[in-house]
Image (cartoon, helix red, strand yellow):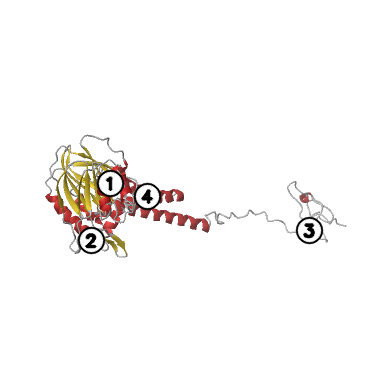
Amino acid sequence: MRRPWPNRRQPDGGRGALGGRARDGERGPDDQPTPDSKATPVGKAAPDSRPEPDSASTPDGGPAPERGRRADRGRARGRVLAVLGLAAAGGLVLHRFVPNTPGRLGSLLETFLFWLGPFTALLLLCAAVRRSRTALVALLVPVVAWTAAFGPLLLPAAPPGAREFTVLQHNVADDNADPAGTAQALADGGADVIALQELVDPALAVYRRELAARYPYHAVRGTVGLWSRHPLGETLALDIKPPEITEPWRRALRAEVRTPYGEVAAYVVHLPSVRLGPTGLASARRDESAALLGRILEAEQSPRVVLAGDLNGTVDDRGLAPLTSRLDAPERGLALSYPAVLPVARIDQVLARGGTVARIRPLPGTGSDHLPVLARIVLDAASPAKG
């Protein structure tokens, strides 16, 4: 009888002992458990040994859609900050090219030109939080532009020198409830001359009485006045009334101040008010009055001229160009003066010719809605007429 071949399948479906499948109840050499293997209980599925996908990435290893969308939004915000910064730089450098119509848009921008600096600082903070290198680099442009325009005003002023002449400018407000206290505060400022606007009865009599002891010389024309420690010469009322105004209106004077350093032509003025409304900045009357005053200054023969007044505009405002083109603005100091509660602009100005306005600074508030400003002027020994 022939013996079966060892690897021939047996009727029970198993294999022989030599490398074949073990019979029921037997274990072959290939079926020995390895140290790392564990038996799976009967009736339970084997755990999935495949690695779990990364929640922050797609199966092909790329960024998840949500992360990509966040990155796109971050880049978009950075571009917006960069565009806003470049727009601010354009306003600082090219504001003269912004048309004044409609709504005196150019003058409106120039009135608040200083505030493009704090606006840029806010953009820088947002760019730093967003970590946007594009925005940070772009914002360097308005930083440089603002520093060039307003940085010198923040520097220390030169020490007092010879021929120093100090001017205190204040719109006292026609509804001032404490004219006596206001006059006392102004006298304590120690200026050579005090220029006042909105002088009305009965407060005018109070200012005359309270200032007389320290300022024995004074002149009042209409609602503007000048008080001086030094003698006054000829005093004239000036006609700067816009044609549209028909009622009595006297808001400018010129007086000769005989200082120890020579004669100074002092102007005290109050230009018409401006209003901001739905149609823009209403400054036509102010601009007309400034043009009339500019013609008077053009004809002025005195080599030393000082102008103090509520001009209802900043020195950057093109509406005041008839004045700022003939007189020099302060070299140091911001002196924001209006409104007194939270000043946003200096509309109370001291300008000069034949001298340097070395510094201007605000004084503590009075009963007015304007802050007083004190300017220190170094008069030239001699200066030809300008304009």
In the image, residue 139 lies at what x, y percent?
37, 49
**Picture disc at residue 42:** 3
- SS assignment at label 3: loop
Amino acid found under the numbered disc labelled 3: Val
Between label 4 and label 2, give the one nearer the viewer: 2
> In the rendered structure, are the residues bearing label 2 and label 3 in contact, judged by CB atoms less than 8 Å apart?
no
Q: Pointer 1: what residue? A: 210
Between label 1 and label 2, give the one nearer the viewer: 1
The vertical placement of 363 against 20, above or below, is above
Q: Considering depth in this image, is 132 or 112 the residue closer to the camera?
A: 112
Q: Pointer 2: what residue? A: 284
- The Cα atoms of the two marked residues, 2 and 3, are separated by 96 Å
Q: Is residue 261 left or right of residue 39?
A: left
- Quadrant that contains the N terminus: bottom right
Amino acid found under the numbered disc labelled 4: Pro
Q: Pointer 4: what residue? A: 118
Q: Is residue 149 left or right of residue 7?
A: left
Q: Considering depth in this image, is 238 or 297 the residue closer to the camera?
A: 238
Dot 4 or dot 3: first in sequence order is 3
In the image, residue 129 lies at what x, y percent?
46, 49
Between label 3 and label 1, give the one nearer the viewer: 1
Amino acid found under the numbered disc labelled 2: Ala
**Picture disc at residue 144:** none
The vertical placement of 174 against 255, above or below, is below
